[in-house]
Image (cartoon, rainbow, N blue to C red):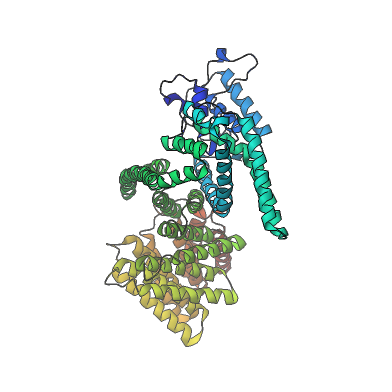
Amino acid sequence: MPIEQTNFPPDYRSVREMIEEKVAGCEAVIHVVGIRYGAEPDPSTLSEGAARRSYTQMEADIARKLEKKLYLFVCPEDFPYDQATAESEELQALQRAYRAEIAKGEILRTEVKDREELGRKVRELQFELEKLKSEIGRNQRRVVVSLVVLLLLLGGIGAGIWRLPDVVKKEVGYDRGRAREQLVADIKAEAQKKIVEAGDDWRKTIEIEEWRDQQLSELDRFLDRIQQTFDAGEATESYRKATDLLAAKGADEALAYLQARGNQRKSQIEMQANRRDQEEAGLRNLLQEELLAASLLETKFRFDDAEAKYRQVLEKSGSWPKARNDFTWFLITRGEVIDPAAGNAKLQEALELCRGTLSFASRQTAPQDWAATQNNLGWMLRDLGERRSGEQCAQYLQQSVVAYRAALEVRTREQLPRDWAATQNNLGIVLTVLGERASGEQSAECIQQSLAAYRAALEVRTREQLPQRWAAMQSNLGMVLRDLGERASGEQGAHYLEQSLAAYRAALEVRTREQLPQGWAATQGNLGNLFSVLGRRVTGEQGAQYLEQSVAAYRAALEVYTREQSPQDWAAMQGNLGSVLSVLGERTSGEQGVQYLQRSVDSLENALSIFTPEAAPYQNSLARANLEKAKAALHKISSH
């Protein structure tokens, strides 16, 4: 419930009184502290010695006075604030003083660095609400019993002594002191009665004593709530009637009346909730159009415009998982193809966005959105893992596996067969990478699990129903079979490599350069890797032929993967090409060997121009090692 002081209607009360009414009706107050002081009451109307406060600061002060939960979010100096006319030095000084006051006096506060973090932290307060609901559920019986006792006691005081009906109707204060004395005495008496009934059950006696002390400590809060309801003008006709009945006839009559009104009240609440849902649904329908526009901007290669559109949708969509997941996927796909340093930043933003989405889209409340977010999370963690080395790489890849397996808990073959197959495919990819980076039994186990994931997905992704996705799966299957072929020797290794070649050729039947140039290039790159493995396994003329086929496949891929449009894919192909040319150079004598090695050095240096140590440490170290090897071989053959 945002409090907009500038939009208050004409009223006989001061703005402060209107703010106090609003805050009194809230369970908690969110207070965002920036660097702008903002609007304030006329300073000349302040009493002598009174501190100047902006209306926003005033809200926080009133929340403290009314003992409301107060959540403080402090924005730093370099927070991406809106552009606005500069305030006077006097107002800036007042805001600096307030920020210093907050820093010294407030223990519980959260500093947020940007809008995304602020939005996420505010939405995380939903968990506070869920915890409160759980706590209320556990204590509901105790609370209801205590309130019934209080209502009985209030009913027993009588209209002649307290004249509660007149108080309610006039909406003025009541004799709080006398009411409190009566309630203290009656709570103690009721507790003593329960203790006598408990007899020798000392556990029950301790429980009753704790209950008594709890009620006494909560008594002032209870009395405050009664007064605040009337002071705020929020007492409905039914509320007044129930209070009249409470004073005149007791708690039983008041409770019976409230229960009789229960169905009508429930209907009104549902009506309000439906109205809110309809408004939210209408907004999301409009935002769907914006998401479509963003996607179309992508197809026109207007990526900056598309990103701006996605961010606009995100600002307006709140906690809508679809908008967040769509933008996350945009960041992932951009992060994969742009310069590695900038790409890492995109992936890190996507990672934070995913984690924020998972903070409010739970498996219980929004299972499919939750699964989609887990799938996105798995994808970006794999991307980040592939760009790292050592322990950090392994952690990212293992977290990716966990995310995909979490998604598969919702994306089952029975309920969502296509999503299930897509996630199995993604799981197979990351397990392949993990197997390549690991060693020993762990590596072999990952590769076997990867093979099982691909074969499972192909049971759903048939060529007849989903030809393009089937082709992508065949290419991925070829990769894992190639890896198994590298690990095995003799006939078994040769069998795996033959199956890998068959899978790649099957993929190329669908992934043609004319129809799917990017998929064609990716499969050509995989084919180059396979021929490289075959060429290294055998020597002589057959080995040389395999290596030449590998070179041809990499060069075919580079016809599509250009440095300008796909720098990372271009660099990967350059690195692979340089490695194969180096092997050819070592196996060839004379001038031709020198040419192979010189081209190898050129290709590897091209790869290193993109794969810097900071942006892609694993790829950088691999290309650098191959470059040093090629230079050493070139020096050796040149000296002869």
The one of 251 and 215 positioned closer to us in this rendering: 251
Residue 114 percent across, percent down from the top left: 52, 40
Q: Is residue 301 above or below residue 463?
A: above
Residue 285 percent across, percent down from the top left: 31, 46
Residue 516 percent across, percent down from the top left: 30, 62
Q: Residue at x 45, y 52 (%)?
A: 335
Task: From the viewer's perspective, tell me whether residue 515 is left or right of residue 338.
Answer: left
Task: From the viewer's perspective, tell me whether residue 339 is left or right of residue 191.
Answer: left
Q: Residue at x 64, y 42 (%)?
A: 186
Q: Is residue 445 above or below residue 167?
A: below
Task: From the viewer's perspective, tell me whether residue 604 is left or right of residue 267.
Answer: right
- Number of residue marks: 0
The one of 240 and 630 positioned closer to us in this rendering: 240
* Quadrant position of residue 310: top left
Residue 362 visible in rendering: yes
Task: From the viewer's perspective, tell me whether residue 367 is left or right of residue 106.
Answer: left
- Which quadrant holds the C terminus? bottom right
Q: Residue furthest top?
A: 44
* Quadrant position of residue 50: top right
Q: Residue furthest front?
A: 160
Residue 21 percent across, percent down from the top left: 50, 29
Residue 548 visible in rendering: no
Q: Is residue 224 above or below residue 40?
A: below
The one of 405 and 162 positioned closer to us in this rendering: 162
